[in-house]
Image (cartoon, rainbow, N blue to C red):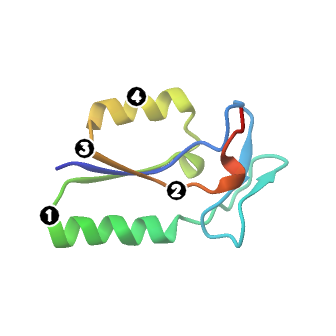
Amino acid sequence: MKVLFLNPPWGIEEESYGRRAGSRWAHRLLGPTEFLPPPFFMLFSASWVEKIFSFPVKIIDALAENKNKQRVLYEISLFSPKIVFIETSTPLLQVT
């Protein structure tokens, strides 16, 4: 069973920057930054799932790799996981 761990792009806007993983709280940034802490809990969980269950695991860190929504969706479709875990926080949810 393929498992995907996803740290998605920050927002809907193409030029949107922010930090969630490795910080005390999620927050927007004024522009790109050289340091984005890795999603420690997600990486730990992915390694655990791979080691304990021997499932194929893929990690997409769209923030660190500067991937937009279209690129992320394309990579998800290529991997076609059965389970997807997403790093997020409530400030990222858009109220409609």
Task: Quarter of the image for the C terminus: give it.
Answer: top right
Image-based side of 87 in relation to 18, left or right: left
Work out whether residue 37 or residue 2 is closer to the camera in this orientation and state it: 2
The residues bearing labels 1 and 2 have C-alpha atoms spaced at a distance of 22 Å
> Of the residues shown, which amino acid type is indicated by label 2?
Glu
Q: Position of residue 71 (x, y in %)?
A: 48, 30
Q: Which residue is mark 4?
A: 74
Q: Residue at x 52, y 56 (%)?
A: 87
Q: Position of residue 56 (x, y in %)?
A: 20, 54
Q: Residue at x 68, y 70 (%)?
A: 23
Give me the disc on residue 54: 1
**Circle nearer the N terminus (4, 3):** 4
- Circles 4 and 2, Cβ within 8 Å, touching? The answer is no
> Of the residues shown, which amino acid type is indicated by label 1?
Ser
**Circle nearer the N terminus (1, 2):** 1
The residues bearing labels 4 and 3 have C-alpha atoms spaced at a distance of 15 Å
In this rendering, the answer to whether 73 lies above or below 88 is above
Disc 4 secondary structure class: helix
- Circles 1 and 2, Cβ within 8 Å, touching? The answer is no
Marks 3, 1: nearer the viewer: 3
Marks 4, 3: nearer the viewer: 3
Disc 3 secondary structure class: loop
Image-based side of 3 in relation to 63, left or right: left
> Of the residues shown, which amino acid type is indicated by label 3?
Lys
Q: Residue at x 14, y 63 (%)?
A: 54
Marks 1, 2: nearer the viewer: 2
In this rendering, the answer to whether 95 lies above or below 49 is above
Q: Which residue is mark 2?
A: 87
**Circle nearer the N terminus (4, 2):** 4
In this rendering, the answer to whether 3 lies above or below 21 is above
Label 2: how many Cα within 10 Å (few below 14, some 14–19, many 20+): some
Q: Which residue is mark 3?
A: 82
